[in-house]
Image (spheres, rainbow, N blue to C red):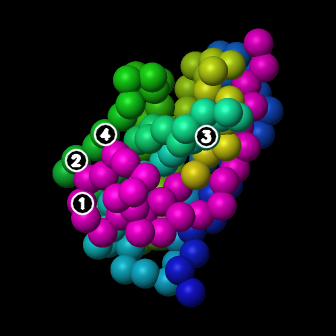
Amino acid sequence: DVQLQAFGGGLVQAGGSLRLSCVTSGFNFDDYSIGWFRQAPGKEREGVACISSFVDSIYYSDSVRGRFTISRDNAKNTVYLQMNSLKPEDTAVYYCAAASSGMATMPREYDYWGQGTLVTVSS
């Protein structure tokens, strides 16, 4: 079975940091780009970051560029999202997803999704 499990969410004060992990199994991790998305209450799912299969391409949304860093460890089938200088507007459920089509920024381009992990940033 394909699994993507996101970990690391929690409650943090504004200006703080969190590191999310996405542990995957059940598919050929090396062949997939992995993205992080987030969805706040009442809002559409937003692409936050994406990393290509061999790290030759990385995407960040304007809202997180310079604060968030995406990375991957192909030996561990895991992708990370280091989130620094967190703001209250970063509060959302964060999801990781896998895309076989290369770099992908839209939810519809992704093949597999994990469950979310809640990040709450207090002011």
Q: Secondary structure at mark 1?
A: loop
116 left or right of 79 in image: right
Mark 1: which amino acid? Gly
Image point (66%, 61%), residue name? 115
Q: To which quarter of the image does residue 83 belong?
A: top right
Q: In the rendered structure, are the residues bearing label 1 and label 4 in contact, judged by CB atoms less than 8 Å apart?
A: no
Image point (78%, 20%), residue name? 122
Q: Residues within 10 Å of mark 3 (few under 14, many from 20)?
A: some
Q: Estimate the x, y position of residue 109 in percent, counting from the top left.
A: 34, 58
Q: Which residue is mark 3?
A: 39
Of circles 2 and 3, the one toward us is 3
Q: CA distance from mark 4 to mark 2?
A: 7 Å
Mark 3: which amino acid? Gln
Q: Which residue is mark 1?
A: 102
The tag on residue 57 is 2
Mark 4: which amino acid? Tyr
Mark 2: which amino acid? Ser
Q: CA distance from mark 1 to mark 4?
A: 12 Å
Above or below, 29 against 115 in this view is below
Q: In the rendered structure, are the residues bearing label 3 and label 4 in contact, judged by CB atoms less than 8 Å apart?
A: no
The magenta span reads 96-123
Counting residues from the start of the chain, the first of labels 3 and 4 encountered is 3
Find the residue positioned furthest to the bottom. 1
Counting residues from the start of the chain, the first of labels 2 and 1 encountered is 2
Q: Residues within 10 Å of mark 4 (few under 14, many from 20)?
A: some
Q: Secondary structure at mark 3?
A: strand
